[in-house]
Image (spheres, rainbow, N blue to C red):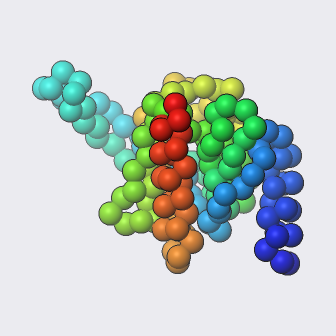
Amino acid sequence: MAPEARLEWNLRVLRRHDPLITRIFDQAPYAVLYTFNHTHAHDPDGGKGRKYEGNWEKTGIEGTVFIVERNEAPHYGFFILNRGGPASIIQVFHKDDTIELGADPRFLTFRPGAWDRAYTPYSYPYATCEKPTLICLWLSDGIAGPRFAYFMTRYFCSVVRLS
């Protein structure tokens, strides 16, 4: 399939999940979504140097991940088209969120600062819970993962600048 035809096909598939998606900026062929299962550790700093103990847990959501634009605010985010089940997800970017590249460019850490269930209607494992503290995307090997992480941080930075 030609790249333009594949892009149009993917856009149609994503719009079935979220009709507000207008554009795909980039994609990585495979990503796995993790959440950090934490407990608060002692924090002598009074919250400034909050430390967590815990471990990363797979959410069961894995598949192709896309950086998308939507025609309503919030305008940018990422969408994982889940291969392992019916629960695909979209996470939009808010100015209060943070995103970090790990030492290994295949790992992208995302900390939601704002949490609005209106933008997470696609069966997030924690959609009915309080906001997650930290989520992580593991991106597949190869050039696609680091390139995708670069574009994701770039679009996230534009959200922060424009807010």
Q: Is residue 119 above or below residue 82?
A: above
Where's the N terminus, which quadrant? bottom right
Q: Position of residue 83 (x, y in %)?
A: 72, 59
Is 76 in front, or is 89? Answer: 76
Q: Position of residue 110 (x, y in %)?
A: 46, 45
Q: Position of residue 3 (x, y in %)?
A: 79, 74
Is 134 in front, or is 159? Answer: 159
Is 150 in front, or is 82? Answer: 150
Q: Is residue 95 above or below residue 99?
A: above
Describe residue 72's horizontal placement relative to residue 50 as left or right.
right
Tag count: 0
Asked if residue 138 can be seen in this view, the reply is no
Q: Position of residue 93 (x, y in %)?
A: 56, 39
Describe residue 137's horizontal placement relative to residue 13 as left or right.
left
Residue at the far top: name it. Answer: 46
Picture residue at 79% right of the left edge, 51% below the top: 14
> Which image quarter: residue 103?
bottom left
Picture residue at 65% right of the left edge, 68% below the top: 29
Picture residue at 86% right of the left edge, 62% below the top: 9
Q: Is residue 19 above or below residue 142?
A: above
> Which image quarter: residue 45?
top left
Picture residue at 48% right of the left edge, 61% below the top: 150
Residue at the far left: name it. Answer: 44
Asked if residue 69 can be seen in this view, the reply is yes
Describe residue 148's horizontal placement relative to residue 42 as left or right.
right
